[in-house]
Amino acid sequence: MDKTYFVVLLLKVLSIKHYFETVDHRVLVGILGRRIKDERVLWLVGKILGNFNGKIGGKGMPLGNYASQFFANVYLQSFPLIVLLFLGKLCLSLPVF
C-alpha cells in the first residue's frame, strides 16, 4: 500500500466525529477477551455495546457512560504500533499537530 494513500486513509478513519459509531463490537470484545476471562464480564460488555442503535449493525458504542470511554481507550491502545509498522520511519517525520 502506498504510504501517502495510507496516511490519507488513516486521517479519514481518525475522524473523532464518527469514532464512537464505528467501533466494531467483535474486534473490541476480542481485544477485551484476551485479558478478561470471566464470561459474565464479557456478556455485560456485549449488553452495553448492544444498547447502541447505530446505522451499522454490530458497530458503535453508546455515548455518555464511563464504559464507552474505557472501551475507546482499549480499542485504540495498539494504534501507535500499527502506525509505526505501516509507515515505518515516515511516521516519525510527520509534523505533530
Image (spheres, rainbow, N blue to C red):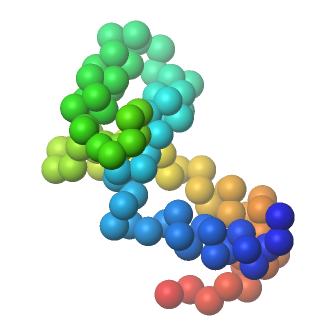
Does residue 91 appear left or right of residue 46 in this picture? right
Question: At 25% across and 38% down in the image, what residue appears?
Answer: 52
Q: Is residue 3 above or below residue 85?
A: below
x and y, in percent, of residue 77 in the image: 53, 50
Residue 8: image x %, image y %? 64, 76
Residue 32 makes an appearance in the image: no
Q: Residue furthest left?
A: 64
In the depicted structure, whether residue 20 falls above or below residue 15: above
Furthest-top residue in this view: 39
Foreground residue, 11 or 29?
A: 11
Instruction: Give left or right: position of 6 versus 75.
Output: right
Quadrant placement of the N terminus = bottom right
Residue at 34%, 23% (x, y): give it: 46
Residue at 39% over, 42% down: 56
For the image, the number of numbered tags is 0
Residue 51 position in % (x across, y down) = 22, 32
Along the viewing direction, whichever of 34 and 27 lies nearer the viewer:
27
Residue 36: in sight, yes or no?
Answer: yes
* Relative to 84, 67 lies left or right: left
Q: Residue at x 42, y 50 (%)?
A: 22
> Camera-side residue: 73 or 43?
43
Q: Position of residue 96 (x, y in %)?
A: 56, 86
Q: In front: 10, or 36?
A: 10
User: Compared with residue 72, is residue 52 higher up or lower down, i.e. above or below?
Assistant: above
